[in-house]
């Protein structure tokens, strides 16, 4: 972050100083985890479901922080922010607080991030915003890897994409940063627009509109309205990168004042993939076609869905000055960065574990199952295992969506399906759908929890098997993948 005094922070947030004269200067990082503080940092006291950050204020100062951003007085130098202006903010849900103190702190954090972003934008910083129903984090990682050779780049680790992680990421940027890549999420109308106000993007990319969080929005069309808030926030001299292979995304061209760059395999795409092929590890190769020329690309990432992600990243990098050859080389060398996303590792005994358990929705679940089917067919004797858990936030569509995934596993000829979750959960429909589709017996089994899944797999998997592990992050199903790899010292 650029240096700011506590006095400046109080002015920015409309707060008041407490146990401080205002000259104390924040020169380090801004953190909401007191364990990560370094000298000169600012501690953000966020109330959570289990602990309240205000209780760690003194500890934060001992760790080297110069002050605390708080909603009430603490035993430390602090800026006390006023009550939140917007009591409808999802910050209440994010922090789990009921008195609005969490919303107040997050609103103050957003104001600081906005002030810093505006100063840096005036000095030449380019903000790139990205949203979509699935693949946001992987695409964000690709964009950051392509931009880093062009200049110092800041991007969030993992999925820091809400009212806490978004401003936290903005405040990682300083006067040396040239590109700030931000991932934007939404659980309701207005959320993406709110994040765009924190750090106004000049380039905005929408990768898809699926059914993730359809329980909150009611339909894909409702989700499209929310995702399109990103391109509506772009300036007239900005760029909207839109996936033309998704009709709802392509239609967003009518909602933005910015210049539109279409990407995809669609013939009208400005940045296009031709001659797409997949190898036996589901790694894509294709011809990257652009107005500036063409170049062959071979991705090291697993999954056909990365073709669209790569095209979005390519379009952003080309707009910011990269050559076609630079982009092709960068995509070929790009690696998986964020954890639990198509992380493919093979044990010494030949068992391959695909850890894609960070998140799940019907679209990403289908893509992962297709990848599993392809990888297991390389050798006829390889058995395929799908260890699947709940797809969250599907609302009234949950039972039907889980049923469809179970049936798809049968149609893709997956050998064994292990459904993880309680009998009273929507996930039960996945087991039932598979059993009805294929008249399965022991090919599909439902177990109550992660420990039961691990126990079953350790008894029954055999050398050469391919095991996919996938669910929404709340299920913590990645523990299954890690347990399997730890058992035999898994190697990448």
Image (cartoon, grey):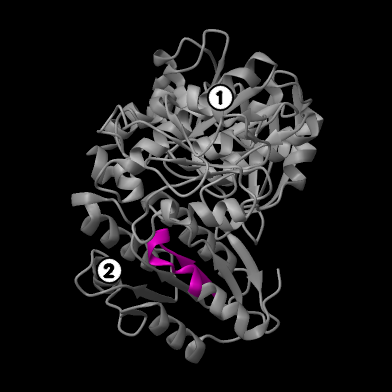
Pointer 2 residue: 437
**Residue 120, position as x, y percentages in the image:** 65, 21
Residue nearest the observer in this picture, 194 or 105: 105
Question: Percent x, y for residue 93?
Answer: 30, 46
- The residue shown at (25%, 70%) is 428
Q: Label 1 vs label 2: CA separation?
A: 64 Å
Of helix, strand and loop, which one carries label 1? helix
**Residue stretch in magenta:** 466-479
Query: Label 2's element?
Result: helix
Check if residue 469 falls in the magenta segment.
yes
- x 46%, y 61%: residue: 369
Residue 161 placement (x, y as % from top left) = 48, 41
Residue 205 in the image: state x and y as whole percent.
Answer: 53, 28
Find residue 422 and report its image quarter: bottom left
Q: Is residue 383 at least partly visible in the picture?
A: yes
Q: In the displayed structure, does residue 126 sit left or right of residue 167?
A: right
Residue 380 appears left or right of 317: left
Which residue appears farthest toward the bottom when viewing the image?
459
Q: Residues within 10 Å of mark 2 (few under 14, many from 20)?
A: some
Q: Which residue is mark 1?
A: 8
Judged left or right of residue 450, residue 188 is: left
How many discs appear?
A: 2
Placement of the C terminus among the 4 image quadrants: bottom right
Quadrant in which residue 328 is drawn: top right
**Residue 269 seen:** no
């Amino acid at each position: 972050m650029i240096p700011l005094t506590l006095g400046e922070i109080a002015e920015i947030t409309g707060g008041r100083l407490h146990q401080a004269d205002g000259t104390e200067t924040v020169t380090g990082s801004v953190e909401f985890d007191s364990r990560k503080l370094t000298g000169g940092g600012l501690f953000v006291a966020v109330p959570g479901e289990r602990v309240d950050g205000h209780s760690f204020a003194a500890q934060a100062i001992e760790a080297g922080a110069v002050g605390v951003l708080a909603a009430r007085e603490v035993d430390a130098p602090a800026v006390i922010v006023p009550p939140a202006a917007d009591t409808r903010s999802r910050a209440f849900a994010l922090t789990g607080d009921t008195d609005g103190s969490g919303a107040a702190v997050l609103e103050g954090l957003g104001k600081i991030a906005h002030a810093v972003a505006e100063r840096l934008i005036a000095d030449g910083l380019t903000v790139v915003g990205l949203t979509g129903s699935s693949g946001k984090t992987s695409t964000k990682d690709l964009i950051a890897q392509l931009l880093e050779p062009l200049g110092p780049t800041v991007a969030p680790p993992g999925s820091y994409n809400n009212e806490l992680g978004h401003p936290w990421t903005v405040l990682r940027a300083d006067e040396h940063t040239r590109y700030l890549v931000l991932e934007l999420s939404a659980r309701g109308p207005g959320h993406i627009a709110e994040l765009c106000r924190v750090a106004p993007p000049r380039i905005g990319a929408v990768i898809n509109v699926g059914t993730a969080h359809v329980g909150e929005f009611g339909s894909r069309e409702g989700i499209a309205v929310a995702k399109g808030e990103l391109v509506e926030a772009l300036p007239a001299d900005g760029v909207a990168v839109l996936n033309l292979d998704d009709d709802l995304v392509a239609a967003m061209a009518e909602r933005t004042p910015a210049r539109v760059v279409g990407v995809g395999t669609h013939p009208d795409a400005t940045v296009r993939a031709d001659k797409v092929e997949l190898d036996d590890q589901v790694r894509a190769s294709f011809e990257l076609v652009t107005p500036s020329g063409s170049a062959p690309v071979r991705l090291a990432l697993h999954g056909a869905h990365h073709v669209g992600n790569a095209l979005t990243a390519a379009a952003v990098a080309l707009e910011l000055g990269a050559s076609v050859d630079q982009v092709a080389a960068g995509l070929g060398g790009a690696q998986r960065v964020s954890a639990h996303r198509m992380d493919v590792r093979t044990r010494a005994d030949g068992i391959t574990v695909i850890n894609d358990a960070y998140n799940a929705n019907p679209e990403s679940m289908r893509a992962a199952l297709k990848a599993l089917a392809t990888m297991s067919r390389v050798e006829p004797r390889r058995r395929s295992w799908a260890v699947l858990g709940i797809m969250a936030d599907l609302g009234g569509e949950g039972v039907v969506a889980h049923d469809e995934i179970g049936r798809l596993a049968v149609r893709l000829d997956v050998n064994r399906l292990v459904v993880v979750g309680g009998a009273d959960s929507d996930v039960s429909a996945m087991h039932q759908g598979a059993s009805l589709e294929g008249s399965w017996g022991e090919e599909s089994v439902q177990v109550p929890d992660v420990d039961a899944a691990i126990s079953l797999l350790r008894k029954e998997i055999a050398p050469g098997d391919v095991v996919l592990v996938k669910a929404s992050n709340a299920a913590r199903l990645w523990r299954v993948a890690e347990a399997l790899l730890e058992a035999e010292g898994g190697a990448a």
